[in-house]
Image (cartoon, grey):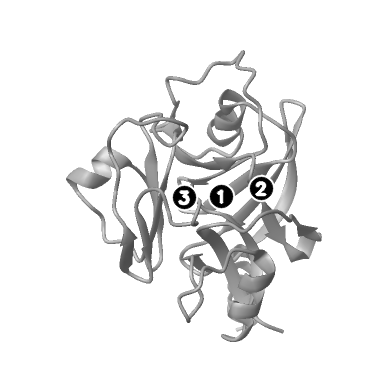
Amino acid sequence: MYAAIWIAISLSLLAATSAVAADCRPVEFKDMAFTVCEADPDSDDIRLVLDDPDGTKIGTFDRLADVLAQEGREIVFAMNAGMYHPDRRPVGLYIEDGEQVARLVTRTGPGNFGLLPNGVLCLKETAARIVESREFASDPPDCMGATQSGPMLVINGDLHPRFLPESRSRFIRNGVGVAEDGRLIAAISDQPVNFHDFGQLFKDHLGTPNALFLDGNISRLFAPDIDRHDIGFPMGPMLVVTRPAN
């Protein structure tokens, strides 16, 4: 009897400790500093946000916190979630709460967005995927939220073919990947880095078979638990993980 009770208690403790809460932490890779945040799509509230309930673009982390507080939620972490036009409209595909706001773009174009292959972060009810844009166009998955950006950082386990180790194009950059076990992993460099090094972070250190560049230079992170609150000009789409407010 006592053995059966002990086994039940042990299994209960194991289940409790295996559910890891969303969080952020510092990471060093190749003598460079990054901040990495993780969340579990199966248990965490992960969403993409652009406008407040009145249709006004939210733009800042402070305003985002105010909007979420009205729902009784608080931010675990948030970051900019893709490129946007001067009026802060998304450049490529954007879906929020199942509603498509901007269409998918698959053509080659100028800038980082047009450095094909680019891709889409697709958020489902209990899962997340990074899908190359033309693959997405040929067989669109059902996404509750989606944001398109580019270039892809990691494509089926390989770095983007256009990345050069010796590139001198260095910026603060942020991106997102999905691990093989389904965890959503977002990262921002804490110092200027090139695409090659940033892609290697996701491929070799974070172990994401597919990862997507979100933006550079304007990249920012809000993570209250580690006292991180980057400031700057108003943003377009934001990726946010929330929890019930205390």
Q: Residues within 10 Å of mark 2 (few under 14, many from 20)?
A: many
**Residue bearing the label numbered 1:** 185
Q: Within 10 angstroms of label 3, few (less than 14), some, or many (20 or more) residues?
A: few
Total numbered circles: 3
CA distance for labels 2 and 1:
7 Å
Q: Which of the image's four quarters has the C terminus?
A: bottom right
**From where the camera sits, is residue 41 visible?**
yes
Residue contact between numbered discs 3 and 2, judged by CB atoms under 8 Å: no
Q: Earlier in the sequence, mark 1 or mark 3?
A: 3
Q: Between marks 1 and 3, how big is the CA–CA gap?
A: 26 Å
Front residue (pair 157, 160) = 160
Q: Quadrant of residue 169?
A: top right
Q: Position of residue 72 (x, y in %)?
A: 61, 86
Q: Disc 1 residue type?
A: Ile
Query: In the displayed structure, would residue 212 be above or below residue 140?
Result: above
Q: Secondary structure at mark 3?
A: loop
Location of mark 2 (residue): 36
Q: Amino acid at mark 2?
A: Val
Residue at 48%, 81% in the rendered image: 53
- The local secondary structure at tag 2 comes to strand
Determine the image quadrant of residue 71.
bottom right
Residue 101 rendering spot, x and y as whole percentages: 34, 63
* Residue at point 61%, 33% (across, down): 201
Query: Relative to residue 102, is residue 55 drawn left or right?
Result: right
In the displayed orientation, state which residue is furthest to the left.
138
Query: Do the residues bearing badges 2 and 1 touch, measured as CB atoms within 8 Å?
Result: yes
**Image location of residue 189, percent across then percent down:** 68, 39
Q: Which residue is painted at 47% across and 41% down in the image?
A: 212
Q: Is residue 132 above or below residue 221?
A: above
Q: According to the image, label 3 marks what residue?
A: 85
